[in-house]
Image: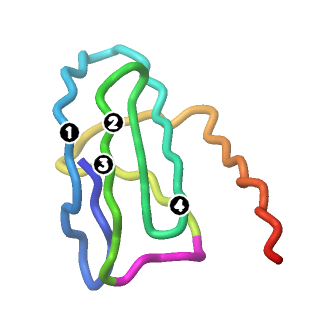
Amino acid sequence: MLYKSSRGYRPVASAPFPWQHGQRYELNLKVEGSKLVGWISNGPELIWDDEESPYLHGQIGLSNFGGCHTLFDGVALNPLEKIPTT
């Protein structure tokens, strides 16, 4: 599930995923403008377009809720190449 933090957290998108305790997963996110596409390993895509008030600059945040224990390992960010404008 994807949450947006804006005056508190609220869910904005979700996709079913049959996770297993103790299993490692790779989370992938691609952001272009207000559109976010995410997927875990070979799971289904989660697509969300924030048409109301997108964050076009800023930072990432990884979190969990309800006393969960999660290890985030090897977090990497890769900037997109800028497309020349004419």
The type of residue carrying mark 1 is: Ala
User: For residue 81: magenta?
Assistant: no
The label on residue 60 is: 4
Estimate the spatial distance between the alpha carbons at disc 1 and disc 4, rounded to whole Å: 20 Å
Estimate the spatial distance between the alpha carbons at disc 2 and disc 4, rounded to whole Å: 19 Å
For discs 1 and 4, the disc positioned in front in the rendered view = 1
The structure residue drawn at horizontal position 72% and vertical position 54%, both measured from the top left corner, is 79
Q: Is residue 49 left or right of residue 65?
A: right
Label 1 or label 4, whichever comes before in sequence order: 1
The spot of residue 27 in percent (x, y) is 46, 34
User: For residue 54: magenta?
Assistant: yes
Estimate the spatial distance between the alpha carbons at disc 2 and disc 1, rounded to whole Å: 7 Å
Give the extent of the magenta segment: 53-58
Q: Is residue 40 left or right of residue 31?
A: left
The type of residue carrying mark 2 is: Glu
For discs 4 and 3, the disc positioned in front in the rendered view = 4
Q: Which residue is mark 3?
A: 64
Label 1 or label 3, whichever comes before in sequence order: 1
- Within 10 Å of disc 2 (Cα), the crowding (few <14, some 14-19, many 20+) is some
Secondary structure under tag 2 reads: loop
The type of residue carrying mark 4 is: Ile
* Majority secondary structure of magenta residues: loop
The spot of residue 12 in percent (x, y) is 22, 62
The label on residue 45 is: 2
The type of residue carrying mark 3 is: Asn
Secondary structure under tag 3 reads: loop
Q: Which residue is mark 1?
A: 15
Secondary structure under tag 4 reads: loop
Assign the C terminus to one quadrant of the image: bottom right
Corner quadrant of residue 43: top left
For discs 2 and 4, the disc positioned in front in the rendered view = 2
- Within 10 Å of disc 1 (Cα), the crowding (few <14, some 14-19, many 20+) is few
